[in-house]
C-alpha cells in the first residue's frame, strides 16, 4: 500500500477512536468560566460577552490606540453577561476590560473593522471543532500566533448542541483566540439543540433579529453567513435575505464571501449538498461571489473556480478525520487538521492552508469575480454545468 494511503488510513483510525468524552482541562488562573469574546454586529458596534457564575453586575471599559475611550454597563441573560460597545473607531486596536466591583476580571483586544480607505486585512477560517479537544486546542494555539483581524467558524462547534457543558468547553478552548479577534460564526447541524444554546451564546436576538443568518462587512468585503439547517427553497426568508445582501454588495463593488456548514461542492464523506448547490450556484454567478467557505466534511478541499467562484471546505479542527477522494473539479485536497488564512489586498484574495506543523500545503490567489461570472476565455474553465456532470 502506498505510504500516502497508509497515512490516511492511520489518520482515519485515530479519528474514529476519539469519543465526544475526550477530556479537557483548562489552565488555572481564569476568573470567568468562559469569555470574553467579541462579535462585530454593525458599523462601529461591537458585542462583548462572557459567562459569569457569581456576579450579575459588570462594566466594560475600552481604549483605542488613537486615544478614544468608552464605557458600557453589562446586561445579563442568566449567567451570560454582555455589552454593546457603540461608536468604536474602525482601524485602531481596541483594548477592553471586563470590570466587576473595581476588579478586572478579563481583558481582550479587537479591531472593529478597517480604517476608511484601507483594504488590506487578514482573516482565518476553520471548523468542525466538535470532538477531539486536544486537536481543537492545537489549532487555536497555532492561530493565536498568527496576525489576524477576525475568524470565521464554519460550524459544528460542539458535539451535541443541547449540552451546555460542551459549549463551556468550546469557549474555554477558544478563549485565547477570542481575546484577540472577533468570531464570525456559522451554525452546523451538531450545534442544534432544543435549549437554543447557539442563539443564546451568540446573542442573535440582540443584533440579527433572532436570525441565524446574517451579513457582516469588513473593509471592501461582504461576508454572508447562512444557516444550512433551514430547509430553504427559493423565495423563503433566508433566500431573499441572501439574495438582497449579495445584490447590495454587488452594487457597491464589494468582494463577497459566503460561509456556511454544508458544502455545495465536496469530495469528502458527506459529499456535495446538491440542494444547496442548486440554490446558491446561480446566486454566486449572478452577483459575483468570489469565495464560498464551508465545513461538514472533515477534510480540506479547494475547487477550481466554478463560474468564477472558488469553493473551500475546512472541517478538520477536531472532528474525526475522514478520507477525501478528489473529483475533477478539485484543485487541492488534504486529510489532516488545519486552518486557512486569507489575506485581502484590494480586489485580491490570497489563500493559504496550514497544518499543525506550520506547513503551507495549499495556496492560491482568488481572482475578482464580476457579477454575471467571468468572461469565458479559457476553454478549460469550469462552469456549474460541467461540475454537475462529474459531481457525486
Image (cartoon, grey):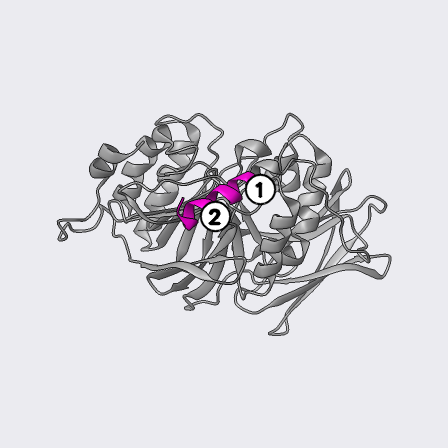
Quadrant of the snapshot with the N terminus: top left
Task: Estimate how packed mark 1 is, as few (under 14), some (14 to 19) or many (20 or more) residues with alpha carbons within 10 Å.
Answer: few
> Residue 335 has which mark?
none
> Is label 1 in a helix, a strand or a loop?
helix
Q: In this view, does 92 lie above or below 239?
A: below
Magenta span has 125?
A: no
Tell me: 172 left or right of 102.
Answer: left
Q: Which of 308 and 143 is in front in this view?
A: 143
Tell me: 368 left or right of 69.
Answer: left
**Residue at the limit of the structure toward the front, as seen here:** 1
Residue 130 place in picture, x, y as percent: 60, 40
Residue 350 place in picture, x, y as percent: 37, 61
> Is label 2 in a helix, a strand or a loop?
helix
**Residue at the limit of the structure toward the bottom, as seen here:** 66
Q: Is residue 328 above or below residue 95?
A: above
**Secondary structure that dominates the magenta span:** helix
Q: Which of 286 and 264 is in front in this view?
A: 264
Tell me: 211 left or right of 75.
Answer: left
**Which residue is drawn at the image coordinates 43% and 34% (left, top)?**
269
The residue identified by callout 2 is 7
Whether residue 47 is visible, yes or no, is no
Tell me: 345 left or right of 51.
Answer: left
Q: In which quarter of the image is residue 92?
A: bottom right
**Which residue is drawn at the image coordinates 51% and 40% (left, top)?**
12
Instruction: State the extent of the magenta-drawn residues as a range.
Output: 1-13
How far is the residue under mark 2 from the one under mark 1? 11 Å
The residue identified by callout 1 is 14
Whether residue 56 is visible, yes or no, is yes
Q: Quadrant of residue 192?
A: top right
Amino acid at each position: 500500500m502506498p505510504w500516502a494511503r497508509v497515512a490516511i488510513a492511520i489518520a482515519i483510525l485515530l479519528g474514529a477512536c476519539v469519543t465526544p468524552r475526550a477530556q479537557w482541562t483548562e489552565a488555572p488562573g481564569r476568573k470567568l468560566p468562559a469569555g470574553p469574546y467579541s462579535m462585530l454586529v454593525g458599523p462601529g458596534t461591537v458585542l462583548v460577552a462572557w459567562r459569569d457564575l457569581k456576579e450579575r453586575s459588570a462594566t466594560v471599559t475600552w481604549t483605542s490606540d488613537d486615544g478614544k475611550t468608552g464605557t458600557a454597563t453589562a446586561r445579563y441573560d442568566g449567567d451570560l453577561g454582555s455589552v454593546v460597545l457603540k461608536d468604536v473607531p474602525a482601524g485602531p486596536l481596541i483594548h477592553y476590560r471586563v470590570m466587576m466591583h473595581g476588579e478586572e476580571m478579563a481583558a481582550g483586544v479587537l479591531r472593529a473593522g478597517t480604517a476608511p480607505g484601507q483594504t488590506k486585512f487578514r482573516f482565518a477560517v476553520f471548523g468542525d471543532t466538535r470532538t477531539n479537544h486536544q486537536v481543537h486546542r492545537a489549532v487555536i494555539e497555532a492561530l493565536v500566533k498568527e496576525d489576524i483581524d477576525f475568524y470565521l467558524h464554519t460550524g459544528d462547534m460542539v458535539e451535541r448542541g443541547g449540552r451546555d457543558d460542551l459549549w463551556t468547553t468550546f469557549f474555554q478552548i477558544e478563549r485565547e483566540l477570542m481575546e484577540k479577534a472577533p468570531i464570525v460564526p456559522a451554525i452546523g447541524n451538531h450545534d442544534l439543540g432544543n435549549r437554543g444554546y447557539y442563539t443564546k451564546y451568540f446573542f442573535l436576538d440582540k443584533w440579527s433579529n433572532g436570525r441565524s443568518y446574517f451579513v457582516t462587512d469588513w473593509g471592501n468585503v461582504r461576508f454572508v453567513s447562512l444557516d444550512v439547517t433551514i430547509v430553504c427553497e427559493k423565495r423563503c426568508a433566508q433566500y431573499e435575505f441572501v439574495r438582497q445582501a449579495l445584490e447590495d454588495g454587488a452594487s457597491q463593488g464589494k468582494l463577497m464571501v459566503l460561509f456556511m456548514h454544508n458544502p455545495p461542492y465536496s469530495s469528502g464523506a458527506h459529499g456535495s449538498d446538491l440542494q444547496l448547490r442548486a440554490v446558491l450556484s446561480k446566486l454566486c454567478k449572478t452577483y459575483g461571489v468570489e469565495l464560498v467557505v464551508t465545513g461538514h466534511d472533515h477534510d480540506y478541499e479547494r475547487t477550481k473556480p466554478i463560474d468564477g467562484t472558488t469553493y473551500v471546505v475546512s472541517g478538520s479542527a477536531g472532528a474525526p478525520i475522514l478520507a477525501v477522494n478528489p473529483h475533477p473539479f478539485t484543485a487541492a485536497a488534504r486529510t489532516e487538521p488545519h486552518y486557512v488564512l486569507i489575506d485581502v489586498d484590494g480586489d485580491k484574495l490570497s489563500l493559504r492552508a496550514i497544518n499543525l506543523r506550520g506547513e503551507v500545503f495549499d495556496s492560491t490567489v482568488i481572482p475578482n469575480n464580476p457579477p454575471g461570472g467571468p468572461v469565458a476565455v479559457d476553454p478549460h474553465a469550469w462552469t456549474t454545468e460541467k461540475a454537475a456532470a462529474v459531481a457525486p
